[in-house]
Structures are given as structure tokens and as C-alpha cells.
Image (cartoon, rainbow, N blue to C red):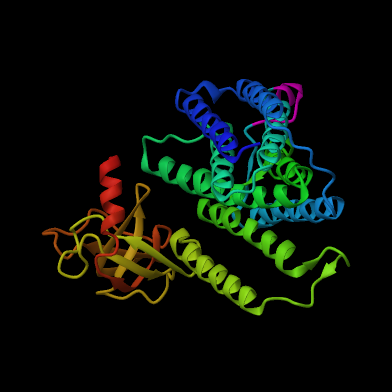
């Protein structure tokens, strides 16, 4: 088949799926499943793909299934630290019919479609296949996030859009070399577990984004660079530069996530008001240490009040009935803060500031608000 004809088919599929997603036709998963089955069936008639059984498919299925199980186990291990929540769906006949069955149909249909379209090896064709897969992923998770507020928008961009692109690059590579079975196996395990288990980990959003972005890269390096499929063992020709670069990138991402999540010893915060003008300007980013001891007069602290993090200076400390009370004030404010801060509401002490780099974040937030 001519390359231009295949690319034309891919463009038509992309536009059709995008229109269905934007008009929320795919809000109901059964409708999405029916559409994917129809598109796959029609595409199979238009594109004849006489490919034979891919070599080492069974080995790759076993490797990918192992990675998928480790992926789920990693989430639940993190849950032991961050805590668990009851799943929004309980395993029942209704859950099986409403979620598990249509998502399974979508996964199988999508990967058969991907494999059929991969008859053409052109770069443009593969990019369009990745776009199609990303749109389908978005349709599956459509409605989970409120795009009208900043938190929902950022969660959608990070958890769905970026990670779907990263995963679809990996899926396309695996499907092209080893067929659809490994990808179907991986997606069934990693996408259906929330509908099966009664509890799910409350893993911080940034950790979820980090894992979903990095995990496909790790699998790619393992299979393509380090694994000798003929001998079914790790290759002796590891690319040390690849290992070192991946390790460095992973370490840097972990550090950033730890800082932004504010769940560890150090945290970062963008200053969103002018109450500390003169010492800390609006748009600056502060780095604070989550310590609650050794707080003195004049220290700038981070504390929580009405679920809002505030950065003000300590102007006096009193011990009343064995309760340490910190009285605070913004440097630019004329009067001190109402009430006082206790150890319960204290988050940490400011250590450093970085000027101006938080301005883009504030601009985006203000646009949404």
C-alpha cells in the first residue's frame, strides 16, 4: 500500500477521534469501545498486513508482564508511606460491565489498530499513531479532572497528556518489533487494577507523573539496550553512558518531586502575596526546611491557616501552659497577624529564596482564578 494512503487514513482517524473527544461523545466508555472496534475493523479491511508471528514475542510478554506487576507493586509500596483510600469503584458485576469490559475492549482494539497501522515504517506514520493512541487514552480518562481550575488542568496535563505521549512512544516501539500482545498484557495489568482492588494508594500527583513518565524509558532501555533476547539474559554490552544519564535524570526528577511535594525534609513554595515585600517579593520561590524546633524571634516561618500556606516573620514567642505560641507578622503589613501559630500548624523555617522564578506559575494561577 502506498505510504500516502496510510498516512491519509491515520489523519482521518486522528481527526475523527479528536472530534469525538472534544464533543464528549467518548465520555461513555462503551461508546468509545464501539468506535474503536469499528475503526479497527474498517482499517483492517483497508490495510492488508500480512505480518507473521514476531520473534521472541512470548519472552517479551513475560518481561513486560513482570514490569507491569512491579509497577502496581511499586504504587502499593508507596501507599504504605502516603496512605490508602477506598477505591471509587468496588469489584462487582456492575463494575465489570461498566468499566472492566469496555476498557478491555478499548485496549485490545487500540493495540490491534496500532499494529495494523505500523505496516508503514515512515516516521510521520509513527507520529500519527502516537497521536491516535494519546487521543484514545484521553477519551478513557475523560471527565476525571475539572479543567476549569488550575489543579485539575495541571493534573490532566501531567498525568494524562504527557504520560500518554510517553507511554504511546513505548507502545509503538514494542508493537512494531514484537506485535500487540506485550502491549495488551502491560496495559490490562496497569490500567485495570484500580477497578479490582478495594483500596488504592493516595500517591502524590507528582510521584504518579514521575513514575508514568520514567517507567516506559526504563522498560525501553532494558529491552532494547541491555537484554539479549536470543540468550534470554542481560546483555554484557551495556551502554554505561545510557545508564549514567538515566540515573542522573531520575535523581534530578526525584529531587524536584520531593521539593515540590513538600512531604520531605525540604520543600519549595511560590510567594503569592506582597505581605513580605522588602524581604521576599511576590513571585519569589522560597526553600524551607520542615523543622519545628529551634524557631527564634526574627525567623521567617511557613505555617498553615485555613488550608493556606503562609510565609511570615516571627515577632514573639510565648510558652503558655506548656504550649509554644508563635506570633507572626508580614514585613510589609502594618499590624501583626491575628491569633498565633502552634506546633500543629507550623510547617517549617525558610532557609533560602530564589528571586522571580515563580512569576510564570503565579501568572498561570491568576489566569485560572
Decide whether residue 161 is among the magenta residues.
no
Return the x and y of residue 74 as percentages of the image width and height. Answer: 69, 56
| In the displayed structure image, the side of residue 347 where residue 131 appears, left or right | right
Quarter occupied by residue 329: bottom left
The number of numbered badges drawn on the structure is 0
Q: For the magenta stretch, what is the residue range?
A: 89-97
Quarter occupied by residue 85: top right
Q: Residue furthest right?
A: 231
Q: Is residue 321 visible?
A: no
Q: Compare residues 206 and 187 and report the one nearer the observer.
A: 187
Return the x and y of residue 75 as percentages of the image width and height. Answer: 66, 53
Q: At x 75% / y 77%, what residue is drawn? A: 237
> Quadrant where the N terminus lies?
top right
Return the x and y of residue 234 as percentages of the image width and height. Answer: 81, 71
Q: At x 35% / y 47%, what residue is drawn? A: 306
| In the displayed structure image, the side of residue 206 where residue 87 appears, left or right | right
Amino acid at each position: 500500500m502506498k505510504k500516502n494512503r496510510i498516512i491519509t487514513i491515520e489523519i482521518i482517524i486522528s481527526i475523527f477521534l479528536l472530534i469525538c473527544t472534544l464533543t464528549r461523545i467518548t465520555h461513555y466508555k462503551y461508546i468509545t469501545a464501539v468506535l474503536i472496534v469499528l475503526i479497527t475493523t474498517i482499517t483492517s479491511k483497508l490495510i492488508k498486513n500480512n505480518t507473521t508471528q514476531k520473534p521472541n514475542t512470548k519472552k517479551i510478554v513475560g518481561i513486560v508482564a513482570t514490569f507491569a506487576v512491579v509497577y502496581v507493586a511499586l504504587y502499593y509500596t508507596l501507599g504504605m508511606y502516603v496512605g490508602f483510600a477506598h477505591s471509587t469503584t468496588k469489584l462487582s458485576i456492575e463494575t465489570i460491565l461498566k468499566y472492566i469490559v469496555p476498557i478491555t475492549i478499548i485496549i485490545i482494539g487500540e493495540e490491534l489498530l496500532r499494529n495494523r497501522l505500523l505496516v508503514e515504517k515512515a516516521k510521520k506514520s509513527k507520529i500519527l499513531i502516537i497521536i491516535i493512541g494519546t487521543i484514545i487514552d484521553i477519551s478513557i480518562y475523560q471527565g476525571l479532572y475539572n479543567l476549569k481550575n488550575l489543579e485539575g488542568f495541571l493534573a490532566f496535563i501531567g498525568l494524562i497528556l504527557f504520560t500518554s505521549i510517553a507511554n504511546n512512544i513505548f507502545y509503538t516501539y514494542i508493537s512494531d518489533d514484537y506485535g500487540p500482545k506485550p502491549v495488551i498484557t502491560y496495559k490490562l495489568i496497569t490500567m485495570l487494577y484500580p477497578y479490582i482492588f478495594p483500596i488504592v494508594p493516595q500517591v502524590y500527583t507528582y510521584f504518579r507523573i514521575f513514575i508514568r513518565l520514567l517507567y516506559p524509558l526504563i522498560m525501553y532501555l532494558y529491552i532494547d539496550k541491555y537484554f539479549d533476547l536470543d540468550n534470554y539474559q542481560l546483555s554484557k554490552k551495556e551502554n554505561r553512558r545510557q545508564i549514567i544519564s538515566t540515573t542522573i535524570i531520575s535523581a534530578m526528577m526525584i529531587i524536584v518531586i520531593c521539593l515540590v511535594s513538600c512531604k520531605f525534609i525540604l520543600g519549595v513554595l511560590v510567594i503569592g502575596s506582597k505581605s513580605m515585600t522588602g524581604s521576599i517579593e511576590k513571585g519569589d520561590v522560597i526553600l524551607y526546611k520542615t523543622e519545628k524546633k529551634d524557631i527564634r524571634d526574627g525567623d521567617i516561618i511557613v505555617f498553615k491557616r485555613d488550608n493556606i500556606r503562609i510565609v511570615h516573620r516571627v515577632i514573639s514567642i510565648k510558652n503558655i501552659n506548656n504550649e509554644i505560641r508563635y506570633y507572626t507578622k508580614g514585613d510589609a503589613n502594618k499590624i501583626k497577624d491575628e491569633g498565633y501559630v502552634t506546633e500543629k500548624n507550623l510547617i517549617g523555617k525558610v532557609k533560602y529564596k530564589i528571586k522571580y522564578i515563580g512569576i510564570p506559575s503565579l501568572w498561570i494561577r491568576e489566569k485560572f482564578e
